[in-house]
Amino acid sequence: MAIHEAVLGGGCFWCLDAAFRQIDGVVDVISGYANGHVENPDYRMVCTDTTGHAEVIKILYDDTKVGYRELLEIFYAIHDPTTLNRQGADFGSQYRSTILYQSDEERRIAEELTQEVQRQLDRKIVTRIEPLRCFYPAEEYHQDYFAKNPTQGYCRMVVAPKVHKVREKFGEKVKQ
């Protein structure tokens, strides 16, 4: 088993974390902050929209069970890649849609899939495809947030529908 990483941002990291944790082959998901200009930021700092960081998840996955392209297909299906610096009611550059690649192969796959998805949409994709420069894990209370707080309002109204969408659209990839 070879473990690989994928780093993605598509709005609030709680949504992406919960969605990807259910995918077979995903070993772990770490919520965090990436590609800003402040070292070791915390949630309060990132929420000021002045550190340059995006809320992201780092997906650790077994590539014998799920591939990078499959992860990106799920990513594009569970968030709106056409809204600049926002997802739903969450807005600011920290909520930007971004694919942070770590190799030329990941960049190629991301660019190719983005072009394919763009052909299916009426609005322009604004997802940024850029190299991962830095990643800082978020505070412990953000990790696996949905599982720890399933009845919290945001989780019921925003996260749960994304989890359901993954199960509905990618059921064959969901852990049994």
Image: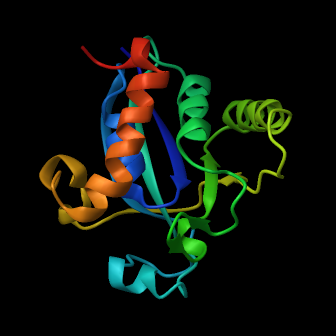
> Total of numbered circles in the picture?
0
- Name which quarter of the figure residue 69 lies in: top right
Query: Looking at the image, can residue 42 be seen?
Result: no
| Residue 72 at x, y percent in the picture | 59, 34
Tell me which residue sits at (44%, 78%) in the image.
39
- The quadrant the C terminus occupies is top left
- The quadrant the N terminus occupies is top left
Tell me which residue sits at (61%, 43%) in the image.
102
**Position above or below: 54 against 98:** below
Horizontally, residue 110 falls left or right of residue 54, namely: right
**Position above or below: 173 against 35:** above
**Position above or below: 134 against 175:** below
Query: Looking at the image, can residue 90 be seen?
Result: yes
| Most foreground residue, 154 or 64 | 154
| Residue 94 at x, y percent in the picture | 53, 72
Horizontally, residue 74 falls left or right of residue 150, namely: right
